Amino acid sequence: LFVWEGVTPYLTPAAVTATLGAIAARAAPESRVALTYGTPELAGFGRALHPLVRPAFAVLGEPLRGLMRPYDAARTVGDAGFSVEGDTSSTEWAEGANVPPPRFAIAERLLEARVLGRRA
């Protein structure tokens, strides 16, 4: 299992693709990758603040470069040799745990995939 958490929003799309390719090339049979990624919606606390999010991260020295929509994330991992097995949000995690969803949530998702051509 490769856990890649909290990194992809700060990488260029080319760096995300290269990293996934490196993982797939080195992965043992039955390997999985669990990665988080940020979406262009950025946050679940209202559109009025969206224009401030990217500049705030840039001021912190962490510009957001690798935000993806779910279909783009699925295509990216698929092109790197993985099969998507799940892609969920923090709201969905809360629902699954039967707890209230987060009031202020960053628009981050968890994508789970396995190496194509390998048996689970």
Image: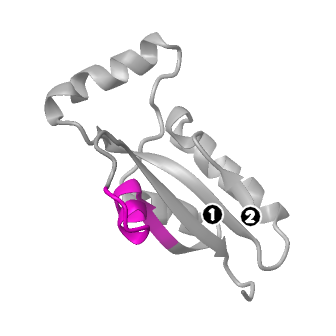
Q: Quadrant of the C terminus?
A: bottom right
Q: Earlier in the sequence, mark 2 or mark 1?
A: 2
**Disc 1 marks which amino acid?**
Ala
Residue 37: percent from the left, percent from the top? 49, 48
Query: Can you see residue 71?
Result: no
Q: Quadrant of residue 15?
A: top right
Label 1 Cα neighbours within 10 Å, binned few <14 / some 14-19 / many ≥20: many
Outermost residue, top side = 59
Give the residue pinned by disc 1: 80
Q: Is residue 84 above or below residue 89?
A: below
Query: Can you see residue 97?
Result: yes
Q: What stretch of residues is rendered in magenta?
A: 86-100
Q: Are marks 2 and 1 in contact (CB under 8 Å)?
A: yes
Answer whether residue 89 is magenta in the image: yes
Q: Quadrant of the N terminus?
A: bottom right
Marker disc for residue 24: 2
Q: Is residue 40 above or below residue 109?
A: above
Q: Does residue 4 appear left or right of residue 41 in this picture?
A: right
* Count of picture labels: 2
In the rendered view, how is the structure colored?
one colour
- Residue lying at 44% horizontally and 10% vertically, measured from the top left: 59
Give the Cα separation between the discs numbered 2 and 1: 7 Å
Q: Nearer the viewer, residue 34 or 73?
A: 34
Label 2 Cα neighbours within 10 Å, binned few <14 / some 14-19 / many ≥20: many
- Residue lying at 61% horizontally and 46% vertically, measured from the top left: 5
Answer whether residue 68 is magenta in the image: no
Q: Does residue 68 appear left or right of residue 29 in this picture?
A: left
Q: Quadrant of residue 22?
A: bottom right
> Callout 1: helix, strand or loop?
loop
Residue 12: percent from the left, percent from the top? 54, 36
- Residue lying at 76% horizontally and 72% vertically, measured from the top left: 31
